[in-house]
Amino acid sequence: MSKKKLTKRELQKRQIFEDKKNKRTLRISFGLLFVFIILYLVFHTFWYDTKFAYRQYAFYGKEVPTELVCMNGDKLLNHKSLKLSYKGKDYFFCNRDCYEHLVNHYKEDAFIPDPLSGDTICKANALIGLKNRGEPEIVYFQNRKTFNQYYKSKK
């Protein structure tokens, strides 16, 4: 079987077609690489902010881990807090200044009323939940019963 020889014009058309195909492949490859790099940089740069925003929604209606709160400012934190003991109880703080503030104002800062029962409770012994969905403010509960009632009443 004999091969058909290509004319110069047909050879040029075939080369142009192949070049277009290769350029298209390169554009798609570099475009995807560029998008991947941008996404990586955005998530790498804003990972803690993204995780913090997620927690403000995910922990609503669930018990918030004590190591993620500052018991002096009553706020959810975007990092783990310091666990420090005072008068035999463990409290969690965002920094040493908050601890010092609790030590100096123990009666005002270490105790808080339960939002439903109104009983005064120690923050170190309380269950912790988010006050509102999407906000970092926390609220303390005396027991699981008041914790569940609070979130049922908010629905």
Image: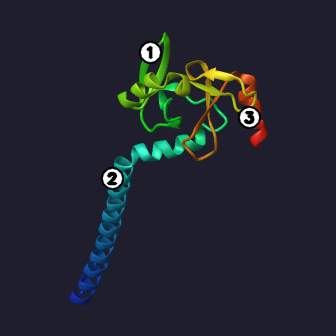
The residue to which callout 3 is attached is: 150
Rendered location of residue 145, percent (x, y): 75, 24
Q: Earlier in the sequence, mark 3 or mark 2?
A: 2
**Amino acid type at image mark 3:** Tyr
Q: Residue 85 occupies which quadrant of the picture? A: top left
Q: CA distance from mark 2 to mark 1?
A: 39 Å
Q: Quadrant of residue 79?
A: top left
The reply to whether the C-beta atoms of the residues labelled 3 and 2 are less than 8 Å apart is: no
Measure the C-alpha gap from mark 1 to mark 3: 29 Å
- Mark 2 neighbour density, 10 Å: few (under 14) some (14–19) many (20 or more): few
Q: Which mark is residue 41?
A: 2
Query: Is 33 placed left or right of 142 in the picture?
Result: left
Tag 1 secondary structure: strand
Q: In the image as oriented, which residue stretches furthest toward the bottom?
A: 9
In the displayed structure, does residue 79 sit left or right of residue 155?
left
* Amino acid identity at mark 2: Leu
Q: Which class describes the residues within 10 Å of circle 1: few (<14), some (14-19), or many (20+)?
A: few
Q: Tell me the number on the disc at residue 85.
A: 1
Secondary structure category for the residue under label 3? helix
Q: Is residue 14 above or below residue 59?
A: below
Q: Nearer the viewer, mark 3 or mark 2?
A: 3
- Residue 128 in the image, given as x and y percentages of width and height: 60, 28
Q: Position of residue 5 (x, y in %)?
A: 24, 82
* Disc nearer the start of the sequence (1/3): 1
Residue in the picture at 53% in, 35% down: 74
- Binning the other alpha carbons within 10 Å of mark 3 as few (below 14), some (14 to 19) or many (20 upward) gives some
Q: 35 or 109: nearer the eye?
A: 109
Residue 77: x and y in percent read 47, 37
Q: Closer to us: mark 1 or mark 3?
A: 1
Looking at the image, which is closer to me, 92 or 2? 92
Answer with left or right where residue 147 lies relative to residue 41. Answer: right
